[in-house]
């Protein structure tokens, strides 16, 4: 049975922010992070590139000021690369355990096709490192978390930390590498995404819009956008969650990424949730909260 203190921590993560604010933070026996009860600082609409487009902004959620820089969780929202908002940020609930959180918006596919989305995410990571001292963030301890399209983008961040393919714009002296990845059901290989393949050839499909056209005529773009083909031994550790009844992103996508990471000697754990679809209650339980918290603590809660 899960220890009571651990269960309380997991439930705290899962509570809506308004409800959580009314509850005292429970002490953790499994984490070196100290639970916070003071009100967080919230900084909204920070531009991470000069002359930013409307969606090239991020929100920062900071724990009370401390002499010790805090690890940072960067959340990247889903929405088929053409919708969604940085206002969606489950990572802000981790402030209760001493983490800082950021929520990033990026240019949508109807405004700019791939690789604009990953270029923006990398620019946001570099900006956060460049301003880490100002905001009390530890630039050595940055993790990312995303779901669906956001899962795809955090996976790309996790496997391209030592590459510069998508690093453009300001703060190029800063690294865009991340220390760990929490990937909820993100696509990993657009060349083998679904059956039949013609499903991706519809001009109005999310993938075709992301790539600038159907996969059948945009093979090079499809490969370039696929995290699977960047996996090396230098990839960040991964925690991957996927439902086995996902109707939008086949669970095989996560299984293939898991296999590639494992083959390369990268720490990676895949949890397939029985009966779960593309999100839903199976991803919002004490068990999944425990997985996420333990994973982040193991990779980011060091001295």
Image: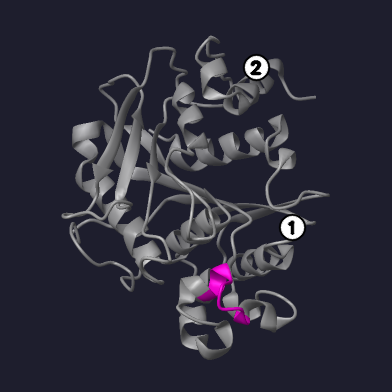
Residue 45 locus on image (x, y percent) = 28, 39
The vertical placement of 262 against 21, above or below, is below
- Residue stretch in magenta: 201-208
Picture disc at residue 11: none
Q: Residue at x 58, y 20 (%)?
A: 29
Identify the residue at the far front of this view: 204
Q: Are marks 2 and 1 in contact (CB under 8 Å)?
A: no
Q: Which quarter of the picture shows residue 265?
A: bottom right
- Say left or right for 293 vs 167: right
Residue 150 locus on image (x, y percent) = 51, 54
C-alpha gap between disc 2 and disc 1: 33 Å
Q: Which residue is mark 2?
A: 5
Foreground tag (2 vs 1): 1
Look at the image and tell me whether residue 256 can be seen: yes
Assess disc 2: are there few (<14), some (14-19) or many (≥20) residues with their C-alpha within 10 Å of its C-alpha.
some
Q: Residue at x 47, y 86 (%)?
A: 220
- Say left or right for 125 vs 291: left
Q: Which residue is mark 1?
A: 246
Q: Nearer the viewer, residue 30 or 273?
A: 273
Residue 149 locus on image (x, y percent) = 53, 58
Q: Residue at x 61, y 56 (%)?
A: 268
The vertical placement of 118 against 33, above or below, is below
């Amino acid at each position: 049975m899960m220890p009571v203190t651990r269960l309380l921590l997991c439930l705290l993560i899962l509570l809506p922010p308004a409800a959580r604010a009314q509850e005292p933070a429970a002490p953790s026996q499994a984490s070196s992070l100290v639970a916070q009860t003071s009100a967080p600082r919230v900084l909204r609409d920070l531009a991470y590139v000069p002359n930013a487009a409307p969606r090239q902004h991020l929100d920062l959620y900071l724990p009370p000021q401390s002499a010790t820089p805090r690890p940072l969780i960067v959340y990247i929202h889903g929405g088929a690369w053409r919708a969604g908002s940085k206002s969606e940020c489950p990572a802000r609930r981790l402030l209760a355990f001493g983490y800082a959180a950021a929520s990033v918006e990026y240019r949508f596919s109807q405004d700019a096709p791939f690789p604009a989305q990953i270029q923006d995410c990398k620019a946001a990571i570099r900006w956060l490192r460049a301003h880490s001292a100002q905001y009390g963030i530890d630039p050595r301890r940055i993790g990312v978390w995303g779901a669906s399209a956001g899962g795809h983008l955090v996976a790309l961040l996790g496997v391209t930390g030592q590459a510069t393919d998508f690093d453009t714009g300001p703060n190029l002296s800063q690294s865009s590498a991340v220390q760990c990845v929490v990937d909820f059901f993100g696509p990993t290989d657009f060349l083998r995404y679904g059956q039949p393949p013609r499903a991706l050839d519809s001009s109005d499909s999310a993938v075709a819009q992301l790539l600038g056209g159907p996969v059948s005529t945009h093979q090079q773009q499809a490969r370039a956008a696929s995290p699977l083909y960047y996996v090396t031994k230098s990839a960040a550790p991964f925690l991957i969650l996927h439902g086995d009844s996902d109707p939008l992103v086949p669970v095989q996508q996560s299984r293939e990424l898991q296999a590639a990471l494992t083959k390369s000697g990268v720490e990676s754990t895949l949890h397939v949730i029985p009966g779960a679809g593309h999100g839903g209650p199976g991803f919002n339980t004490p068990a999944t909260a425990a997985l996420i918290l333990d994973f982040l603590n193991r990779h980011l809660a060091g001295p």
